[in-house]
Image (cartoon, grey):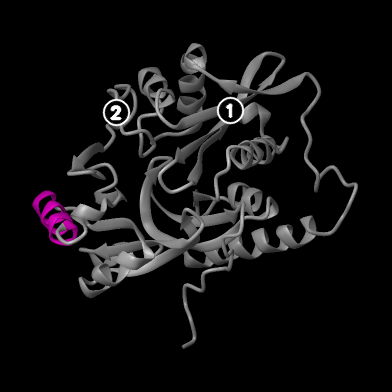
Amino acid sequence: MSPNVAPCSPSKPSVDKLERIGASLIQHGPLNARAYLMHLAPPEEPTIVPTLEKLARTHGYTKIFAKVPEGAAARFTRAGYAAEAVVPGLYNGREAGVFMGRYFADWRRHPANPHALRDVLAVARKKAAQAAIPSPSPSLSPSLPQDSRIIPLGPDQAEDMAEVYRAVFDSYPFPIFDPGYLRSSMTGNTRFYGVLIRDRLAALASAEMDPETGSAEMTDFATLPEFRGRKLAGILLAHMTERMRDLGLSTLYTIARAESYAMNVTFARAGYVFGGTLPNNTHIGGGLESMNVWHLALRDAPSQPFNQNPKT
């Protein structure tokens, strides 16, 4: 989410803070019990690894999670990091982005329910294969329900947006329960879109654009319980993907809950490619969860699946 952090609602767990080290951006805190290198600025590359380790050890974090250009990955590998996911062409369609993890507690490197994660991926891939077959079936071609429309969301809708997020999530890694934070995000490069059904906000999501890299993270999907089963997330994703294409971005990606059939199927059916799994990465929905990375090349970036467990 946006680096402009506003206070979180007292009714939800406190969120971790965003901090700049030079021009690099790090999120860290006790909620996720991790340090997350969200943006690595070239001037900090020679010193960022020891800086992150000191931060993690000082606060007792059990994981460091780093999103870095492929060219910087070797430095992290030498320091004990492992590549957990790869997004080809994340940096302006030319250089891959590598999602790397280092652990300070052995339990955290192992997903709690690996069988469930494998089943979710199997179902998502099966649904994606079905979606690739031309069919008039509504289940494979979601369309907006009657009396509904997609709109860009702005500051005037922030209260309604926060209400939806509070209804859907028990916890979240960024302060989306706070209308002030949502408004501040809108002043940057984050665009929110929502589905209105009979003029009520039923579902929403955001695209966090990074003009420097020509990429965007498709995130913050939420649908009110009474409107689930209508494929609103897929409808929103299709709309947002086209908006990002119109803006000339080269690569889109998401970090989705690895045990969520709905979200993994949504991205797989939309043509996104699996990039890897981040074990016990994010505090969301009331606890730490593993996350799956999916990506889509909008221009000429390579879009090959990431083999997390290569045979060679």
Percent of width and height locating residue 16: 26, 38
Q: Residue at x 57, y 29 (%)?
A: 204
Q: Answer above or below: position of 193 versus 155.
A: below
Percent of width and height locating residue 236: 65, 35
Percent of width and height locating residue 134: 87, 55
Please state which amino acid type lies under the numbered disc 2: Val
Return the residue nearer the eye: 246 or 273: 246
Q: Residue at x 57, y 60 (%)?
A: 301
Residue that badge 2 annotates: 5
Q: Secondary structure at mark 1?
A: strand
Return the residue nearer the eye: 2 or 202: 2
Return the residue nearer the eye: 131 or 123: 131
Q: Residue at x 24, y 49 (%)?
A: 33
Q: What range is drawn magenta here?
A: 48-59
Q: Residues within 10 Å of mark 1 (few under 14, many from 20)?
A: many
Q: Secondary structure at mark 2?
A: loop
Q: Residue at x 47, y 53 (%)?
A: 92
Identity of the residue furthest to the bottom in this view: 312
The span from disc 1 to disc 2 (Cα, nearest Å) is: 20 Å
> In the visual, does 224 lie left or right of 49?
right
